[in-house]
Amino acid sequence: MRTALTLLFLLALGAMPGALLPQRSLNSRKVDEYVAENGWWGRFLDDLQFYDVYASYWFSAIYVLLFVSLVGCLLPRTWEYFKQMRARPVLTPRNLARMPHHASAEVDGTPEQVVANAERRLKGWRRVTREEDGARTVSAERGYLRETGNLVFHFSLLGLLVAFALGKMFGYEGQVIVQANGGQFCNSGVYNYDTFRPGLRVDGSDLTPFCVKVDDFSASYLHSGQAESFLADIGYQSGADLDSGTWRPYPLRVNSPLRTAGDRVYLLGHGYTPVFTVTFPNGQTRTGAIQWRPVDTVTLASEGATKFDPPDVPDAEERRRSQLAITGLLAPTAVFQGELLNSAFPAADDPAVAIDVYRGDLGTDSGRGQSIFSIDQKMVEDGKLKRVARQNLKAGEQLTLDDGTTVRFEGVRDWVSLQVSHDPAQNWVLVFSVLVIIGLGVSLGIKRRRVWVRATPLGDGRTLIEVGGLARTDQAGYGEEFGGLSRDLLALKEGS
């Protein structure tokens, strides 16, 4: 037990870096910033896996050792418990006056009457009546449920560890951004996610199929700009609905997830998508609506890049030289400080953008991965991508490039960030968590206590009654209970 308690303390201590330091599984960019800001100390913590605490070797070792220690502790305790349950209460001590609680009296009556009265009063106690040197004794014990609660608590803790491990092995979690204008997402494969964290036994090929469609999004804010509520009106399909095409409505709110097909869909947050319409010199238009990333969580000022390929250019080389990218800052509620744009409020009350327009080779055909939120700076440094315009635009305004191409800022749309979580052991986690609380409450609330009664005949029809009591665990509160017991057990005394 001491080993288990030590390991439990180490587990709690090991979890502290997971709460105090940024974790890669949640925000890898924040981890990179933290390492860069703290130099050798940040790199040292990285070597110790302090940014991947719950996947680290040392945390897993503590976890496994705690599991083994609990098993090694519980098996002998369970066997001892079953032996105690079958055992008879212990013999009555020879000198009850040495017990922490003691009372005695002479009564008119026989030992048989005293024993019969004791057995009636001690109903519900485990008791046994014995003959000892001409006296009659009753040994009684109560509070066996204390050990039951103790075992339930520890077995439930063991089950909780197993359930967590199974959840990590067979569960998964993924995030995806969906446009709030009818945009859809289907849980049909890992490539539909923006980020995906599979369990150890999940390869992403057998996900539970369901689809979500985000029809609308609304948000309310306090005067300080703090978000008060988010609501996404969604429809979903799962099971037979996928074959029939039926969409079932659901109001998705923060901390009120959609539960379907064994998965949970959470609303994490939202942002804005600027909508640009580019009219090329030949009169053809292209409209781009790609989400931009919030860089200020209070005002939702966002950065990003919206990219275009020129229309009707069959030559690949020429097409690469004529690609366009619109980058810059989006302010949902615009405030200008001279030419500098900023956002004063997170709601889209007066959206505006401060944009740079680049023309040239975006590098999207190079075969290298590229962020949707930025352009390849190497292409800019090599002179293959050049800035051709810079301007602030409000909704409905446009700018004209040197070749006659116009870029019009149409306004903004909402997007929502959804998280899909699958944990096949979550119900067991709930069951074992409830049992942990119940077992702990029982083990703390029930006391093991013993009481003995000895009835010794004195002659002339009188009997000496001695009552002794012992609390095997906590003495607090047993004195009052013993006082009530002794008064009832001595109720045959003369004059009562």
Image: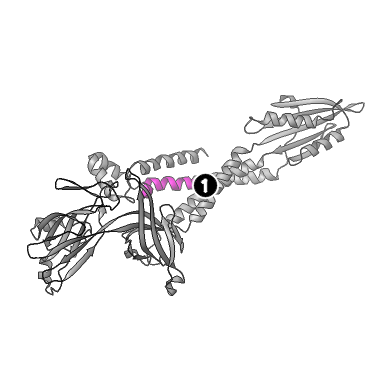
**Pointer 1: what residue?**
157
In the picture as drawn, the residue positioned furthest to the right comes out as 460
Is residue 155 among what the camera can see? Answer: no
Q: Nearer the viewer, residue 59 or 402?
A: 402
* Residue 55 within the magenta-colored segment of the rendering: yes
Where is residue 378, by image quadrant?
Answer: bottom left
Majority SS type along the magenta span: helix
The spot of residue 349 in percent (x, y) is 27, 52
Badge 1 crowding class, 10 Å Cα cut-off, few under 14, some 14 to 19, many 20 or more, is many
Residue drawn at x 67%, y 43% is 84
Where is residue 314, by image quadrant?
Answer: bottom left
Residue drawn at x 37%, y 44% is 18
Q: Secondary structure at mark 1?
A: helix
The spot of residue 399 in percent (x, y) is 13, 60
Residue type at tag 1: Leu
Render colour scheme = one colour
Q: Is residue 234 above or below residue 47?
A: below
Where is residue 287, by image quadrant?
Answer: bottom left
Left/right of residue 257 with respect to residue 439 in the rendered view: left
Q: Nearer the viewer, residue 411 or 167?
A: 411
The spot of residue 173 in percent (x, y) is 38, 57
What is the total number of numbered labels drawn onto the structure image? 1
The spot of residue 125 in percent (x, y) is 73, 40
Residue drawn at x 10%, y 66% is 321
Q: Which residues are magenta?
A: 52-68
On-image quarter of the C terminus: top right
Q: Is residue 277 above or below residue 148?
A: below
